[in-house]
Every structure is written in C-alpha cells, then in structure tokens.
Image (spheres, rainbow, N blue to C red):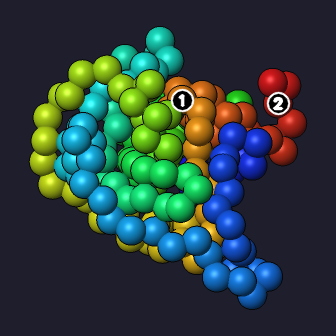
Amino acid sequence: MALLTVASLISPTGYAESGRPCAATVAVTDEKFVPGQVWSFKSREFEPDATLKVLKVESMAKIGVIVHVRLDGIRLRNCSGGPEPETIQHAPFTRGAVDRSVGKLVRTGGVPSFEDGYNDWKRHCGGVYTISVREMVEVDEKTFNSGSGCSA
C-alpha cells in the first residue's frame, strides 16, 4: 500500500481507532482531473513510461480536493534482489500535488477496481499526500526496503 509514511501526509480529523468518526468526503467534479484519465508524470529517469490513472475525485473539509490515483510503470527497486513492484493501486493526493506532478494527458479509459485500497484508506481515516507523486514513490521505495538490512 502506498500510504507508508506519515511525514508526507495530511491527516484528516478524527480517527476510527479513537472512536471518533473520520472526516467526511464528498464526490466532486474537477475541471482538470476526471476518473479514467491517464497522465504522464514527472517520474524518475529509470521510469520513463510511468503513468498515473485518476480513480476518483472528492473533497474533504480542511483538505480540499483529493485526487485518488493508481500508479503504473514505476519500479520500487528491491535492495534484496526480490520482486520489484511496478504498480501502486491506490494513493490519495491533494489536487495541488497531482497538478504539480503531471505532464501530458496520455489517454482516457475505464477505472480499474480500487475499492479495497480506497475502503481501507477510509476505514483507517487515512492521510492525503501533499508531496509530488515522484517524491511519494521515492519515499515508498525507501519504506519498501526498510528492514531489509540495505543501506539507503
């Protein structure tokens, strides 16, 4: 799951673990980002074909517009030589973070299933990334490799 670092997230108010309700989200229409769009993004040099697909657009009080995305064509390098994930199935970003990250609109199409990751995010009152998509992938790679005994 892409939500592995607290430092790069805005956390919504209210946490399910404390018994308080999570902040409510409301589906919204955005003038630029529409579910099913596939965008290039400013990725790392060894991920030239990386894309992000818009899954859902919604709004949350105190945070604003949230763009839920799927990332394909990435490469979470595995320092131990094991499998290297090429997809992050669900990651929520502020609209501004996605806007700063995208390049060109590549195509439009259907929205793949993402409900498991989205529902898990909702259930845990998950945070929202404010950093760029590239920075999130870099942090995710470091988190993916943490505990493997590899130097950073």
Q: How many marks?
A: 2
Residue placed most toward the observer, 90 or 93: 93
Which residue is under mark 1? 132
Question: Does residue 51 lie above or below 121 as drawn?
Answer: above
Question: Does residue 63 lie above or below 46 as drawn?
Answer: below
Question: Does residue 33 lie above or below 25 as drawn?
Answer: above
> Which quarter of the figure has residue 121?
bottom right
Labelled pair 1, 2 in contact (Cβ < 8 Å): no
Question: Which residue, as the protein is rendered here, is positioned at the far bottom?
Answer: 19
Side (left or right) of 88 relative to 50? right
Location of residue 141 in the rendering, given as x and y in whole percent from the top left corner: 64, 35
Side (left or right) of 10 relative to 66? right
Residue 78 visible, this angle = no
Closer to the eye: label 1 or 2: 1
Residue placed most toward the observer, 120 or 80: 120
Side (left or right) of 78 relative to 45? right
Residue placed most toward the observer, 49 or 35: 35
Name the residue rendered at 71%, 83% in the picture: 20
Name the residue rendered at 53%, 61% in the picture: 61
**Amino acid type, mark 1:** Ser
Few, some or many residues within 10 Å of mark 1 (<14, 14–19, 20+): many
Question: Which residue, as the protein is rendered here, is positioned at the far top?
Answer: 45
Location of residue 26 in the rendering, given as x and y in whole percent from the top left corner: 39, 68
Which residue is under mark 2? 150
* N-terminal label among 1 and 2: 1
Side (left or right) of 23 relative to 43? right
Name the residue rendered at 33%, 65% in the picture: 27
Name the residue rendered at 76%, 81% in the picture: 17
**Amino acid type, mark 2:** Cys
Location of residue 54 in the rendering, given as x and y in whole percent from the top left corner: 30, 47
Question: Does residue 34 lie above or below 111 as drawn?
Answer: above
The kind of secondary structure element at disc 1 is loop
